Amino acid sequence: MDNDKIDISFFTWSSVLGALIGLGQILDSSEQLSWRVVVGRALVSAGLASTAPALLTWFPQMPRMAEFAFAAMLASLGTSALQSIVRRVLLGRNN
């Protein structure tokens, strides 16, 4: 793939993967659900998963399967876990 071109198919598939993971997590939960919560979590998970190609900035030869695995990891962690990780990295382990 040429680095100057956007691979829209990978973006689409990683977004779909993230949305499915988000929906799976919702189905596994026991909380009261509304359509707003279901759609919101699916969209957030899809958005997180779609950021996986950013790894190509640091690892341009990364295999496609590793990118999908990273997309799945981001979607599975969710926003609260990622916020916690970033907070620890930026503020140090004790905060």
Image: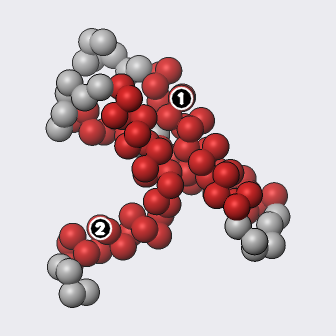
Asked if residue 73 lies left or right of residue 16, the reply is left
Asked if residue 88 lies left or right of residue 78, the reply is left
Query: Which residue type does callout 1 highlight?
Result: Trp
Assess disc 1: are there few (<14), some (14-19) or many (≥20) residues with their C-alpha within 10 Å of its C-alpha.
some
Does 75 appear above or below 29?
Answer: above
Determine if residue 69 is in view: yes
Asked if residue 49 lies left or right of residue 30, the reply is left
Q: Residue at the top extreme?
A: 2
Q: Position of residue 92 (x, y in %)?
A: 18, 79
Q: Which residue is mark 2?
A: 86
Q: Residue at position x 80%, y 66% from top? A: 33
Q: Position of residue 91 (x, y in %)?
A: 20, 79
* Mark 1 vs mark 2, CA separation in Å: 26 Å
Q: Position of residue 89 (x, y in %)?
A: 21, 70
CB under 8 Å between discs 1 and 2: no
* Quarter the C terminus occupies: bottom left
User: Which label number is shown at residue 35?
Assistant: none
Q: Residue at position x 38%, y 21% from top? A: 6
Q: Residue at position x 64%, y 58% from top? A: 25
**Front residue (pair 8, 13):** 13
Q: Residue at position x 27%, y 17% from top? A: 4
Assess disc 2: are there few (<14), some (14-19) or many (≥20) residues with their C-alpha within 10 Å of its C-alpha.
few
Q: Which residue is mark 1?
A: 13
Q: Circle 2 sits in a helix, a strand or a loop, which is it? A: helix
Determine if residue 48 is in view: no
The answer to which of marks 1 and 2 sits earlier in the sequence is 1
* Quarter the N terminus occupies: top left
Q: Residue at the bottom extreme?
A: 94
Q: Position of residue 49 (x, y in %)?
A: 47, 44
Query: Which residue type does callout 2 highlight?
Result: Val
Q: Circle 1 sits in a helix, a strand or a loop, which is it? A: helix
Does 64 appear above or below 1?
Answer: below
